[in-house]
Amino acid sequence: MKACSYCGRENADDVIRCTGCGTEFVLAEQPREEIGSINAVTVSTAFNPADAQLTRSRLEAAGFHAIVSHELSALSMDGYGLTVGGIRVQVPESEATEAREFLESSTESPE
């Protein structure tokens, strides 16, 4: 088991992303600078953590490298979700245009 450095959740050793917050685990042989050099672009904002994780899952199923950020900024009180700026679903800058098109096309209703 390994603990997420972002949210502290225990995860199985073979997972790539935290099952709690979606933070990607850094492999020991992969330099941190290489990971940090990729600019993440927000392609969706949600005010409910479940909606953000659903969007991330849809993007990953379509082959995008999506992450959820600022999920811990969400607070729920009496059934209401309170967030500052929303929970962000982000992809690498090189995938942003295609990811936005994918999300827009999958929410359009058929005529």
Image (cartoon, helix red, strand yellow):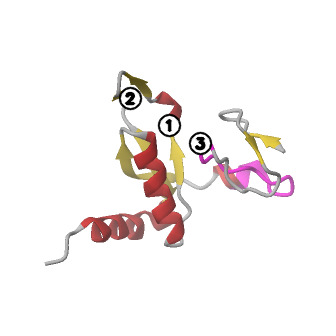
Element at label 2: loop
User: Mark 1 vs mark 2: which is more N-terminal?
Assistant: 1
Residue found farthest to the left: 111
Q: Which residues are magenta?
A: 20-34
In whole angstroms, how far apart are the C-alphas of marks 1 and 2?
A: 9 Å
Query: Looking at the figure, which quarter contains the N terminus?
Result: top right
Is residue 37 inside the magenta stretch? no
Please give the count of numbered marks on the rendered protein: 3
Residue found farthest to the front: 78
Q: How many other residues sit within 10 Å of disc 1, few (<14), some (14-19) or many (≥20)?
A: many
Q: Where residue 65 sits in the image (x, y, percent)?
A: 56, 63
Element at label 3: loop
Query: Looking at the figure, which quarter contains the C terminus?
Result: bottom left
Residue at numbered disc 3? 21
Q: How many other residues sit within 10 Å of disc 2, few (<14), some (14-19) or many (≥20)?
A: some
Q: Where residue 91 sits in the image (x, y, percent)?
A: 50, 58
On screen, residue 111 above or below 15: below
In whole angstroms, how far apart are the C-alphas of marks 3 and 1?
A: 7 Å
Callout 2 amino acid: Thr
| Residue 71: mark | 1
Callout 1 amino acid: Glu
**Label 3 with label 1: CB-CB less than 8 Å:** yes
